[in-house]
Image (tube, rainbow, N blue to C red):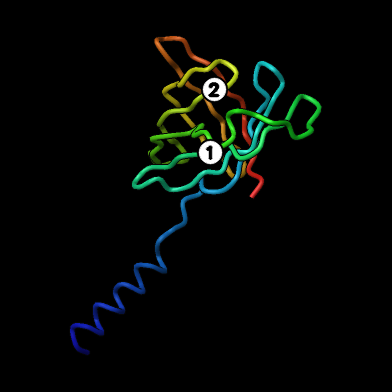
Amino acid sequence: MNKFALAAVAVLMGAGMATAEPLLGTWRTAADDNGNSGLIKVDQCGAKLCGTLVKSYGPDGKEIKSDNIGRKIISETVNKGGGAYTGKVYSPDRGKTYKSKLQLNGATLKVSGCVLGICRDGGTWQKVK
């Protein structure tokens, strides 16, 4: 087998063994202080992960307009292994960006964060797709 063929086989084997990033997809947030929730679409942003608000819902569960649509809610997020992630999360109801800790467990994501020593539980998000 020539060097080119051997290299092609190695690339194909490596691609097949690569695992998809489980945080990618769309997540429904827990209700915030105002009872609102949203859909966050998580994508690769270079070597890190980020999540953008794509829909907002009021306390009654009906879609509402929000100035935060298109805003990065999750940013600078990295997979630490074992379902743990760190990065930043923006909280629209408080207008603050927190240093985040995310814990993935199947189709649920436990979100928490701290800023200036003040920590907040962001609840549990549910994967929708």
Where residue 49 appears, as percent x and y from the top left, is: 43, 42
Asked which secondary structure carries label 2, the reply is strand
In the foreground, 31 or 72: 72
Asked which secondary structure carries label 1, the reply is strand
Quadrant housing residue 53? top right
Alpha carbon distance from label 1 to label 2? 12 Å
**Residue, x 66% and y 38% (percent of image)?**
55
**Residue, x 46% and y 10% (percent of image)?**
118
Task: Check contact, mark 1 vs mark 2: CB within 8 A.
Answer: no
**Residue, x 68% and y 25% (percent of image)?**
31
Q: Which mark is residue 52?
A: 1
- Decide: few, some or many residues near mark 1? Use Cα within 10 Å; few <14, some 14-19, many ≥20: many
Residue type marked 2: Ser
Q: Earlier in the sequence, mark 1 or mark 2?
A: 1
Residue with the mark numbered 2: 91
Where residue 57 appears, as percent x and y from the top left, is: 72, 31
